[in-house]
């Protein structure tokens, strides 16, 4: 009887091996496509992340690559610090982002260039005429009219520059990069403005004159291009 039991057990081994083999093949047929799909999804996710980061990097560098944009942002920061108007950069950023995102813009390139040139010219003149005031003097002599005029000018400048960014760049990541790059330049301009008004006010006026001249030549180039 023991010998017969061993024979029966041994006779069942091929059947069990065959069953296990079929189960392994079935499991493999399910796992292999799933693993391949998971790998493909992971690859696509990494590619998408890399694309988003690349777009954001391009957008961030955009304000630094254009002399007109960089000069305007630095000038806004300097002028805001000199007049103790911390709300100006925030207003500029808000209008810039909205104008950049409000695409498509039905504006010709020449029109945009003239608007940007006008913003540079006016900002240069404002910097040249800026004098150092204390916070109390700024609040007393600024007046409602001066504040409203400043807001209108800053908003219009931001719209021109934002429209130019929107025409040249596409995608949310690129526009967010532009926003962060512009904010960085505004901060640099603000810090520089605080230093200039206490140590070298003549440098600020000289830079304002140079910016106004640059805006004028930019306008002439746009007209006769």
Image (cartoon, rainbow, N blue to C red):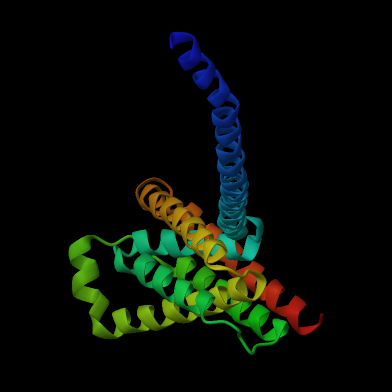
Q: Is residue 2 above or below residue 35?
A: above
- Residue 51, percent from left and from top: 62, 54
In the image: residue 183, left or right of residue 169: left
Furthest residue in direction front, as rendered: 1
- Residue 204, percent from left and from top: 47, 56
- Residue 70, percent from left and from top: 57, 60
The quadrant in which residue 92 appears is bottom left
Furthest residue in direction top, as rendered: 3
- Front in this rendered view, residue 63 or 144: 63
- Front in this rendered view, residue 197 or 221: 221
Q: Is residue 94 above or below residue 102?
A: above
Q: Residue at x 63, y 72 (%)?
A: 215
In the image: residue 177, left or right of residue 168: left
Look at the image and tell me in which quarter the C terminus lies.
Answer: bottom right
Q: Residue at x 65, y 61 (%)?
A: 66
Look at the image and tell me in which quarter the N terminus lies.
Answer: top left
Q: Residue at x 50, y 52 (%)?
A: 203
- Front in this rendered view, residue 182 or 14: 14
- Residue 199, percent from left and from top: 39, 45
Q: Residue at x 56, y 73 (%)?
A: 161
Furthest residue in direction bottom, as rendered: 106
Q: Is residue 119 visible?
A: no
The quadrant in which residue 136 appears is bottom left
Q: How many marks?
A: 0
Q: Is residue 198 visible?
A: yes
């Amino acid at each position: 009887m023991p010998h017969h039991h061993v024979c029966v057990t041994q006779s069942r081994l091929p059947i069990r091996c065959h069953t296990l083999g079929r189960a392994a093949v079935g499991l493999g047929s399910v796992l292999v496509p799933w693993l391949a799909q998971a790998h493909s999804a992971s690859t696509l996710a990494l590619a998408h992340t890399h694309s988003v980061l690349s777009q954001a990097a391009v957008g961030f560098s955009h304000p630094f690559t254009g002399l007109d944009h960089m000069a305007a942002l630095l000038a806004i920061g300097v002028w805001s610090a000199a007049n103790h108007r911390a709300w100006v950069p925030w207003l500029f950023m808000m209008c810039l982002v909205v104008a950049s995102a409000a695409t498509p813009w039905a504006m010709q390139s020449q029109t945009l260039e003239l608007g940007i040139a006008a913003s540079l010219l006016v900002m240069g003149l404002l910097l040249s005429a800026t004098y150092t005031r204390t916070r109390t003097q700024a609040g007393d002599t600024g007046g409602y009219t001066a504040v409203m005029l400043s807001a209108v000018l800053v908003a219009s400048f931001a719209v021109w520059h934002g429209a130019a960014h929107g025409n040249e760049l596409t995608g949310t990541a690129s526009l967010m990069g532009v926003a962060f790059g512009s904010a960085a330049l505004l901060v640099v301009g603000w810090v520089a403005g605080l230093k200039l008004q206490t140590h070298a006010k003549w440098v600020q006026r000289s830079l304002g004159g140079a910016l106004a001249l640059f805006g004028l030549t930019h306008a002439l180039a746009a007209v006769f291009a």
